[in-house]
Amino acid sequence: MLDAVKLLYSERPAEKSGRVSLWVVKRDASVGKPLLELEKVEVWVTLHAGQEDLEAYAQYGHAGLRRQKVLRISEEIVEQNGVATQEDLARLLGTSVRTVRRDIAYLLKQGMRVITRGVYSDIGPSVSHKVVIVEMFLNGFVYSEICRKTQHSAKAVKRYVNTFGRVVRLYERGIKDAEEIAKYAGLSTRLVNEYLELYSRLGQKTGCRQRIKDLLEQLSSRPAYPGADKSGMKKGLPAGEEVR
């Protein structure tokens, strides 16, 4: 049953196409020691996200695509108990540390904080840029506005919004534990907690509540993956059996 639910709700397939591994400083490593002496952890990051990256490049050019990668990669590292330095990001993206710093400053002006070792050491974990984007959607921004402001592809923005909807859907079906939702949805517990906090904060706000309702109805009206029926459950499951 768990495998079927994961097929329904997971944000993306588990394969490592377009992904690379690297060693970074462990997230809770001590501050003040030389970098070479700190404990490291191996992480996998999405260097190439296929169609999403192609769309971002076509719309926003090389700089826009690079900024999207800076956000994506830094958050994927944090979700795997690591934290990147600006030098890590520069090496991975084949650019200079100075350019990465400019990208980080640009993104911060747009309300999206890049989580690097320096930032994490100073203020701890920040809200995911995915949550920032979903909040814009709930507050009435249309997809084209969100894409322009965040320099993300429409495909990426819609995926973040739909994933938020699936998390809420599981929560409303009675799965209240964030770790359990994370297992079903194929997400990190950290991101699920942030989505649930957003739902708790904006779920009763009139305009946001209607947008969430419309989103859940939209998700319920179509199969979540090839082979699912209109109820969203995998074909072949016993009648009446559903996510609990």
Image (cartoon, rainbow, N blue to C red):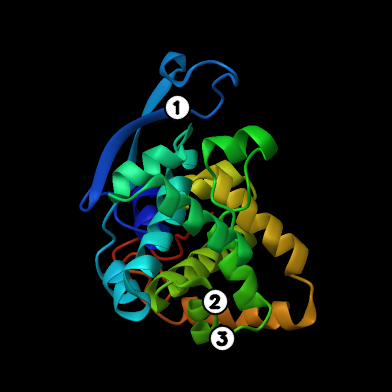
Q: Is 11 displayed left or right of 216 in the figure?
A: left
Q: Looking at the picture, does residue 234 appear above or below residue 143?
A: above
Q: Residues within 10 Å of mark 2 (few under 14, many from 20)?
A: some
- Residue 242's spot in the image, x, y percent? 47, 60
Of the residues shown, which amino acid type is indicated by label 2? Lys
Label 3 vs label 1, nearer the camera? 1
- Residue 6's spot in the image, x, y percent? 38, 53
Residue occupied by mark 3:
142
- Residue 9's spot in the image, x, y percent? 42, 60
Please, what secondary structure does the residue beneath circle 2 have? helix
For residue 149, the mark is: 2
Marks 2 and 3, the one that precedes in the sequence: 3
Q: CA distance from mark 1 to mark 2?
A: 31 Å
- Of 107 and 138, which appears nearest the observer? 107
Of the residues shown, which amino acid type is indicated by label 1? Val
Of the residues shown, which amino acid type is indicated by label 3? Val
Q: Looking at the picture, does residue 42 appear above or below residue 10?
A: above
Which of the 4 quarters of the picture holds residue 139? bottom right
Q: Is 68 displayed left or right of 129 in the figure?
A: left
Q: Residue at x 33, y 64 (%)?
A: 234
Residue occupied by mark 1:
25
Marks 3 and 1, the one that precedes in the sequence: 1
- Of 48 and 163, which appears nearest the observer? 48
Marks 1 and 2, the one that precedes in the sequence: 1
